[in-house]
Image (spheres, helix red, strand yellow):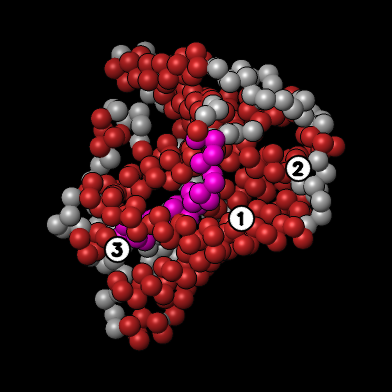
Amino acid sequence: MLKNSHFLRFAAASAVIVGHAYVLNGFSDPIETASLGLFPTGQIAVYVFFVISGYTILQSRLQSADTGTFLLKRFLRIFPGLVGSLLFTILLVGSICTSYPLGRYLTMPETWFFWDNLKLFPHTTHVLPGVFQGNPSQGVNGSLWTLSYEILLYAFVACIVPFFRSRWYLFAGLFCAFFLSICLFNDAIARHEILRIVHLQPDQLVIFSTFFMLGMIFRIFREQIPLKGTWAIVAIVAWLGMYYPSSIRGWVPLITIHWVRFFCLSYLVIYAASIPGRLNDFGRFGDLSYGIYIYAYPVQQVIIQYFGATMPIPLQILLAFVLVLPLAWVSWHFVEKPALRYKSLLRADPGVRKEQSLPPESSFKSR
């Protein structure tokens, strides 16, 4: 069990706010600059989400009665909150920020095209008529694009579990082959071409899939992988230390930093999530991370439209938190949590019988 998963997701969603604050104002991320490119705030935060998701989504599938039950639970977790966010964005944010008269804005077909973000695939609308036209970025909610990758990986889990249920070492072997292939064919993957049908970027899909599958592997082999502070320090040193031989000395390709980061960051996330302590009960306040993630971007754009020219970015970040946290709280308690209650209508989980397809359950080897 990931004891601190609620806190880590909350921290990751908060880090996305910090990263977006600079990008949306047209500035570079100072944390990324100070870390010599090793720690792009928003990117690292999203990677943390995918590592945790790989672990928890596989666990959810193993505890579900069947594939249909699993997919319905995933639907209830994602789409009700997304509907609330789109309503908020179209009706409230759009109405107060559009340059068009309100009546015209509400009757324009382009306004309601924004609902196509519900389908996620293939193309979605990123702007609303007359909204944020004076901002450095005109995107209305630039956080939603990662949901397509997340949902595709839910489908991936749904498909592979029946096949690999008793063949998890084969899955690990195939993952190694997959990782080797992305190392060998990195140039081809990084061409930024769009995949047909799903319309996703191959390079982003590979990155998110790798972190997600590493989270799965930590779930599958949780008894075989020791989670200790010593190894966490080694992971930090390996990740940060790779900058010298790659970027400064040129002894190894620069891309090596990213290859090492996959494993080091994944280990650090799972280790941090497994540590017992006061943060284990962070979830008692509700799971606000998803709400923060899907509401923060439009709120930050509103702040930039009205105060961006005069308000320092640190104050913009603080104001964004002040405004977004109540929205996330309302989303959880009045939209997301009530929707999840419909899980009780599903067939009972199979319990231990399903878990027997993985190595025996027991506590993490923490520290």
Among the two numbered marks 3 and 1 on one chain, the one whose residue lies closer to the N terminus: 1
- In the drawing, does residue 250 fall left or right of residue 274? left
Q: How many marks?
A: 3
The type of residue carrying mark 1 is Arg
Return the residue nearer the eye: 69 or 211: 69
Return the residue nearer the eye: 116 or 47: 47
Reply above or below: 97 against 49.
below
Res. 41 visible in picture: yes
Return the residue nearer the eye: 167 or 232: 232
Q: Are marks 2 and 1 in contact (CB under 8 Å)?
A: no
Among the two numbered marks 2 and 3 on one chain, the one whose residue lies closer to the N terminus: 2
Q: Quadrant of residue 106?
A: bottom left
State the predominant SS element of the stretch in magenta: helix
Return the residue nearer the eye: 275 or 103: 275
- In the drawing, does residue 167 fall left or right of residue 84? right
Residue lying at 57% horizontally and 48% vertically, measured from the top left: 150
Residue assigned mark 3: 302
Q: CA distance from mark 2 to mark 3?
A: 41 Å
Residue lying at 54% horizontally and 26% vertically, measured from the top left: 275
Q: CA distance from mark 2 to mark 1?
A: 16 Å
- Tag of residue 77: 1
- Tag of residue 273: none
Q: Which residues are magenta?
A: 279-302
Q: Are marks 2 and 3 in contact (CB under 8 Å)?
A: no
The type of residue carrying mark 3 is Val
Q: CA distance from mark 3 to mark 1?
A: 27 Å
**Is disc 3 placed on a helix, strand or loop?**
helix
How many C-alpha atoms fall within 10 Å of the one at disc 1: few (<14), some, or many (≥20)?
A: some
- In the drawing, does residue 39 fall left or right of residue 187? left
